[in-house]
Amino acid sequence: MSKGSNSDIYNRFVKKGVFPPQMAFTLLIPARNLFLSPKQLISRLQLRKNSRVLEVGPGPGYFSTHVAKVLTGGKLVLADIQQEMLDKAKKRILRKKISNVEFYLCNGDNFLLPDESFDTIFLVTVIGEIENKNAYIKEFHRLLRKGGILSISELKGDPDKLTISEVKELISDSRLVFDNLFGNEDNYTINFKKE
């Protein structure tokens, strides 16, 4: 991906679309905890120590390091369409000496990963950026084990933010069923379960 002009980067930062890796440092600001802290997210994900977890669109790994530490007998896979973001997340994870994380570059359409590989798939302020949402939702269903959780978190201020009803509508044809809702319309996590 080309570096782009400063105005291109700024427009991608404040408008709808894929988040620019040049602004990834803004995703690491601790003030994010006011909207959703790693501790809150982890409690909403219903993780077990041996869970296999897929995080889609991890950015520089703000939540990733915390989730990986909970998975003492499990694995976290970070998937992103931007190699630059994966590189930033990998650097943070290696610096913290976390070894149960793998990195996967997505193609924007499907995941070349085995069926029923994950107990949990989660996205934080990402679903609105995905161009081919229906294809991704279909893939999430394929990738989840029976009883697995798809968790979508959306936060106030994100220009790509979907409402709770928009997320429910998006998932409605997926054979994933509503499981739980945390928070409110401004800042929420909504979980769906594969039956």
Image (cartoon, rainbow, N blue to C red):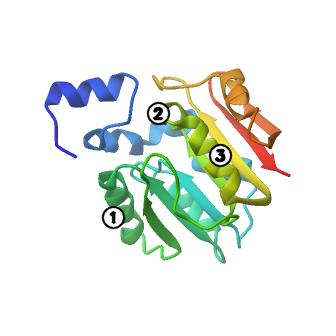
Mark 3 or 2, nearer chain start: 2
Quarter occupied by residue 16: top left
* Separation of marks 3 and 1 at Cα, in angstroms: 31 Å
* Separation of marks 3 and 2 at Cα, in angstroms: 16 Å
Check disc 2 and report the residue beneath it.
129
Check disc 3 and report the residue beneath it.
138
Q: Residue at x 55, y 59 (%)?
A: 66
The mark lying in front, picked from 1 and 2, is: 2
Residue type at mark 1: give it.
Answer: Lys
Check disc 1 and report the residue beneath it.
91
The mark lying in front, picked from 3 and 1, is: 3
Residue 138: image x %, image y %? 65, 46
Badge 3, how many Cα within 10 Å: few under 14, some, many 20+?
Answer: some
Quarter occupied by residue 17: top left
Mark 1 or 2, nearer chain start: 1
Tag 3's secondary structure? helix
Q: In the rendered view, would you say 114 is above or below 35? A: below
User: Position of 125 compared to 117: left or right?
Assistant: left
User: Position of 83 compared to 99: left or right?
Assistant: left
Tag 2's secondary structure? helix
